[in-house]
Amino acid sequence: MRKMMAVLPLVFVFVLMAGCAKPPQDAINSATAALDSAKAEASEYASSSLQAAEDARAALEAELKAQQDKFALFRSYKKTDELVADLKAKSEKAAADAAAGKAQAQTDATTAINDATTALTDAKAKLEKAPKGKGTAADLEAMKADLTAAESTLAEANSSMTAGKYKDAKAKAEAAKCRPTTSSARSTPRWKRRRVTDDSPHVALERFRGTATRPCPFFLHRRAPTRLSPRAWIKGPESLTFFGT
């Protein structure tokens, strides 16, 4: 009887120790809920912060499993408390970074849509002033088609903006802006866009006169004329030889 009375306090202590060695479940639930709440927007606007929070949760789960595998009397959740606090802090940071990233994306999308709208308006004005005549019909039709496509893409960008899909809205607005920029080049007459080559009229004329110049307009960076040998007058430019060579 006396031996039983002596053992009972020890049993009571062991039971007490086992009862105290429990994981901080309420804190774990709170930290996990914070991560789940931040995940939706953080996955799009703060992926690096979300990954850090996910790593913190993985470390917490590994520690919980390690303690669970131990004998009840040897379990300790001191490190678990630290990991829970780390998870909670990183989850809150992911949420804050996601909010900031979303706000910046909204600003960028708004700017892109405004720029695209301005470019489209300017392109329409240039189309109205574009020269109309022989050789311009194909260019004008192509420009009209580009502007129609740009308007459609810009409308999609506005729809994405309304739906809160700011990255998609920015991408579509930038795509819409490119079309008027490309189309505006078509409003320039072909004779102004023609590249000067060796076959250009002024080059052929100067060759006929017995001088050779660079294949560029005669009033830009003109090189000193070079006299041609008499043989060149007969055999043509492909047989050019220079005096003194």
Image (cartoon, rainbow, N blue to C red):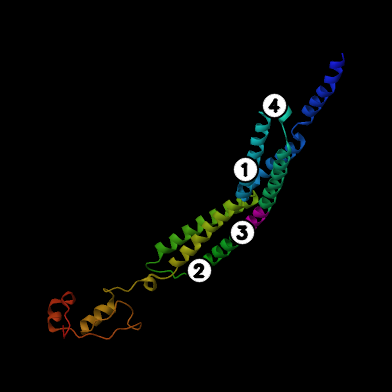
| Element type at mark 2 | helix
Dot 3: few (<14), some (14–19), or many (≥20) neighbours within 10 Å?
A: some
C-alpha separation, residue under disc 4 versus residue under disc 1: 27 Å
C-alpha separation, residue under disc 3 versus residue under disc 1: 30 Å
Secondary structure mostly seen in the magenta stretch: helix
Disc 1 marks which residue?
A: 55
The residue at the point 32 percent across, 77 percent down is: 216
Q: Earlier in the sequence, mark 4 or mark 2?
A: 4
The residue at the point 50 percent across, 68 percent down is: 126
Q: Could you tell me the amino acid type at mark 4?
A: Phe
Q: Earlier in the sequence, mark 2 or mark 1?
A: 1
Residue placed furthest toward the front: 2
Dot 2: few (<14), some (14–19), or many (≥20) neighbours within 10 Å?
A: some
The count of marks equals: 4
| Element type at mark 4 | loop
Disc 4 marks which residue?
A: 71
In the rendered image, is residue 159 in sight? no
C-alpha separation, residue under disc 3 versus residue under disc 2: 27 Å
| Element type at mark 1 | helix
Nearer to us of marks 4 and 2 is 4
Nearer to us of marks 4 and 3 is 4
Disc 2 marks which residue?
A: 126
Q: Earlier in the sequence, mark 4 or mark 3?
A: 4
